[in-house]
Amino acid sequence: MKNSKPKSGRDRMIAAFFVVIVAALGQIASAVPQQKDGSNELLVLPGEIGQRGGRLVVSLRGEPKTLNPLIAADARSREVISVMQADLVHINRATQLTEPALAKSWRVSPDGLVYTLILRRGIRFSDGEPLDADDVLFTFQVYLDEKVHAPQRDLLIVGGKPIVVRKVDKQTVVFQLAKTYGVGERLFDGLAVLPKHLLEKPYQEGKLAQIGSLATAANQWAGLGPFRMKEYVAGQRLVLERNPYYWKSDAKGTRLPYLDELVFLFVPNADAQVLKFQSGETDAISQLGAENFSALSKQQRGYTMTDAGPGLEYNFLFFNLNDAGEKTSPDQQRKQKWFRELKFRQAVSAAADREAIVRLIYQGRGSPLWGPETPANRRWINSAIAHPTRSLDRARALLKEAGFRWSNGTSDDSVLLDADGKPVEFSILTSSSNADRTKMATLLQDDLKQLGMRVQVVPLEFRSLLDRVTQSKEYDACVLGLVSFDTDPNSNLNAWLSSGATHLWNPSQAHPATAWEAEVDRLMEQQLSELSFEKRKKAYDRVQAILAEQQPMIFLASPDILAGAKNSIGNFRPAVLEPYVLWNVEQLYLKGGQEHVAR
Amino acid sequence: MTARRSLTKWFVALCVMHGIVVCAGFFAPYDPGGQDRRNPYMPPMRLHLQDARGQLHLRPFVYSLKLRDGSFDQYQEDQTTLHPLQFFLSGAGYRLLGFVPCRWHLFGVENSRIYLLGSDGYGRDQFSRLLFGGQVSLLAGLLGAGLTLVIGAGIGSVAGYFGGWRDDILMRLSELFLALPWLYLLFALRAFLPLAVNPLQAFFLIIAVIAAVGWARPARLVRGVVLSAKERDFVRAARGFGATGGYLWRRHILPETSSVLWTQAAILVPQYVLAEMTLSFLGLGVPEPVPSWGNLLSSLQQYSVLVSYWWMYLPALAMVPFFVGYLGIASSLQEREQPYKVDRMGLGSLT
């Protein structure tokens, strides 16, 4: 259910200012050996050598809304765009480290304020037009233009001051920062470089938001990604063809991508994706739920299912801690009094059976969570956070300390009463389209019943759920999940900063409501501008410890990344970062690819 | 007289089935909400008479099921100990008929759990949930049908008896209700209601909704009967003797409609049980963890459940005997009424 949760990723806000200082010194990054043959500087990818040709079919849950990176907000559009566009510096989804992409190298000044990027020579867009520094300049001009409302603007701006981008020569661009920025060159990942020759006119006419629909003619759209537009059939499929000008090659010098065509079929839901994959109509599948994964695993015919290990999705329960002031109904005020009580939240956390969630919902293909980072993020997770086992006794002791009592001693149908003698009753919202989270809430309902709390599970359509949580704020508690788009703590910035929009328990605060939220804010700002990993890690460890102690979100569990592909697909290596399967689409190939072409 | 006998037969059969559901707490071995989290999606256990060594036992027994190593839902029988079926044991507390606290269960096993119809994704006993779910679904059907008939009989007889503009208005209204896409109406209605409705509220809401939507058809039937009845000679005679409208309606007209109403009831109850199941299946009915037949089936919306766990279909079969019973009653009611009616019609046409 990729599209059924708010993304902290795209919304990451960067609290850094960019200022002009040119530095002479810096480090040159070159993770991958380069091939230089005069005019062309292809990026040579190591790894298994594949065969050219063939077509790969995958399915999408619904149609992508657009091909235009400037307006893409839904996960499906981003998945399609990720194979049609390219960025200057890219995070390798397997190693989770940055590596050169359109920029063959970059230098960072010793003070960390100036990034000098050298563009690869001889690169062409998918329509054959050459790329140079002017395209990069134009790209960032568009991203930063307020009138365009690009979602990328947030990444490049803080305090209303835009990043300053300067062209040095045809191949060299300089980015200048006002303040040191801990994320470094990871910033450039996912920022597609746009074709100036196609977009300049619509930009000047103010029509950028209207272009790039799926119905765009193939010759009216271009990118730097491995595939380009070929055909779109409304409601059925999007066919992409190989970009002959793509700037990567394999070790033998074959220009990538190997595949001739990449087809996205539009299907209504996850079950339809499974059926298509099972019947052989699609070649690969990702973002599988554990139940579907095991259903597919039982009858593997010509395909292999892969458990890529823990992902970056974290699921949690949170209570409504908003302070709506006088507008709050007395009923809600009474409930919020419980929710604000730290011991109440800790008791709920102590009663939550995380092992059961992992076993019953993820069928063991997941990990229980006690803090915000999943085991997938080995670099940043605070391993000192305690993993207390489930204990109803501890939960009861905490509730007792907080002034709660039971109507009827310790008998089965005893009801938990608050200090005023009112029974503790509340509802948990879940997204009706996400069976996993509804099940999670149902398990919690039973866990909390054992503490005498009467809990109701309310599955809601996802949009009205989000509306309640972020706009009207009329709810008691909610089970949701977030997916970090990167391992870096900055991808969660919007969730932990009290001013953030995905600070779900009390979003978009003007001032932090509590002392610990103020401390989290301070630590997050600190790690943002810190350059040394150790210092950033120390700050972020503290953030994780505070969140684990204060339990504004009761972290529950994280599912593994589950995927599958036909055995005939080579180089299939699902990653735990988005896009899980297509991240190395240029290297995917069909074993015996020629037969497939004939078919 | 065969019609009467078959009516009695169907009636007794239905009474037995309803009795079992009403006393679900006694017939079900476990609490319907009780989760056994170590045993999700356990297939139905087999009742054995012969053990692994070939020895015969008089008392049926089960082997408990153990998860295969490294598997989530593959079970195998653990044949080291057999668990004989025990009758009348003490177990989870429940309230018989809704108010008598009780702990006796018809059957069960000691030191283990018995899953006659398997378990669901939370390790809850499907057999217990089926019986308790019947309480919700059947009661919703019965109350809904009752309410529908009261509304339908009231509106139908007013329209038929008074005629004129009242008839016009009520009948146009009924046509409007017949044409309503009620499923969408329900979705809309649900959106207006407060977020968290507790199971009891949800239950009565369903009944109110299906009754409010379904009254049109019985109302039209009743109107037809009333229309013809009020012109009968004995009614006219009574009126001539000075009987009031209320007396006429109570004494002469309402009894005329009874056969229509009984037949309608026998048809409407299963229809409304099905309506409740549809609503719960779509998540508009009683919320978890309260079982109803629709809730039990709703996990089948997931493809993985559909293909992997066949026993999750069983609740769909449970309603078959009930429906057969009700439709049997409906048809024998019809058989019983038919000669009687023809006879009277013949008499009526003599005048």
Image (cartoon, coloured by chain):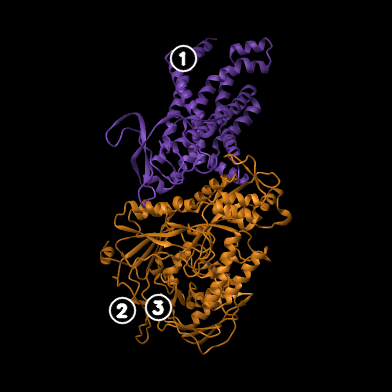
Q: Residue at x 30, y 71 (%)?
A: A50
Q: Earlier in the sequence, mark 2 or mark 3?
A: 3
- Pick whichever, A19 or B235, lies toward us: A19
Q: Nearer the viewer, mark 1 or mark 2?
A: 2
Label 2 sits on a secondary structure element that is loop
x and y percentages locating residue A520 in the rendered image: 61, 67
The relative height of residue A243 versus residue B217 in the rendered view (above or below) is: below
- Residue indicated by mark 2: A253
Callout 3: helix, strand or loop?
loop
Identity of the amino acid at label 1? Pro
The x, y position of residue A346, in whole percent, is: 59, 55
Chain letter, purple in picture: B
**Residue annotated with mark 3:** A128
Chain assignment, label 1: B
As drawn, B273 above or below A495: above
Q: What residue is pinned by disc 1?
A: B339
Give the alpha-carbon distance from disc 1 to disc 2, as whole Å. 93 Å
Q: Colour of chain A?
A: orange
Q: Nearer the viewer, residue A278 or B38?
A: B38
Q: Quadrant of the C terminus of chain B?
A: top right
Q: Position of residue A95 (x, y in %)?
A: 42, 72
Where in the figure is residue A380, as x and y percent of width and height? 50, 69
Q: Label 3, label 1: how many angstroms apart (C-alpha)?
A: 89 Å
Give how far apart the Cα atoms at labels 2 and 3 are.
Answer: 20 Å
Q: Amino acid at mark 2?
A: Gly
Task: Assign a secondary structure to mark 1.
Answer: helix
Whether the residues at callouts 1 and 2 have beta carbons within 8 Å, the answer is no
Q: Quadrant of residue A226?
A: bottom left
Residue A134 visible in image? yes
Which residue sits furthest right? A326
User: Where A261 sits versus B144, above or below?
Assistant: below
Q: Is A273 on the left-hand or right-hand side of A152?
A: left
